[in-house]
Image (cartoon, rainbow, N blue to C red):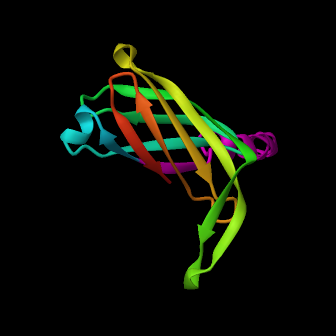
Amino acid sequence: MRVRRRIYLALLPLAALAGCAPQRTMQIIPTGGPFAAAGVKITAVMTGSGNSGRIKFDLPAGVTCEGPWNVVPGGALSNTTGVGGYTRSNVARDTGTAVGTCGGGVTFQFDFTIDPDTKRGEGMGRDSNGNFYSVSF
């Protein structure tokens, strides 16, 4: 009995880590191209931790797209308007990119910035089928 309990206790941390990678949802809104005309909205799941991970989403035709994403801390400066209308100039923002492939050979790339305080991100992207996107998370 004690041996089983020790094995169980030893494996418990591994079980907690397997499949518990942090994730966030990215909204992908077509702004130009065939998908924009159809009024399509796409939701992607970004998994990983720290400054890198994987992104995965399905195109409207049911084709799955996936690839890596990464972030470079402090890679951009921007002006931010806060509550009450004040503006913070030259706010350091993290920059990121997600690239990958979809079934059928379609490729995509999203470029985005992230506010290091709120962890909210926004940006734009495109795919090799002539679609352009606005992304946010």
Is 22 included in the stretch rendered in magenta?
A: yes
Name which residue lies at 48% across and 28% down. Answer: 66
Q: Is residue 101 above or below residue 34?
A: above
Name which residue lies at 23% across and 32% down. Answer: 34
Frontmost residue, 51 versus 87 = 87
Q: Is residue 16 above or below residue 82?
A: above
Query: Furthest residue to the left?
Result: 38
Count of marks overlaid on the render: 0
Residue 55: where, in percent of width, then height?
52, 36
Frontmost residue, 38 versus 10 = 38
Residue 96: where, in percent of width, then height?
63, 41
Q: Is residue 130 left or right of residue 92?
A: left
Name which residue lies at 66% across and 45% down. Answer: 95
Question: In terms of image quadrants, where is residue 118?
Answer: bottom right
Residue 86: where, in percent of width, then height?
62, 80
Q: Quadrant of the N terminus?
A: top right
Query: Furthest residue to the bottom?
Result: 84
Is 131 included in the stretch rendered in magenta?
A: no
The residue segment tinted magenta is 1-27
Name which residue lies at 74% across and 40% down. Answer: 11
Frontmost residue, 20 versus 58 = 58
Q: Is residue 28 left or right of residue 76?
A: left
Question: In terms of image quadrants, where is residue 70?
Answer: top right
The answer to whether residue 91 of the structure is visible from this angle is yes
The answer to whether residue 26 of the structure is visible from this angle is no
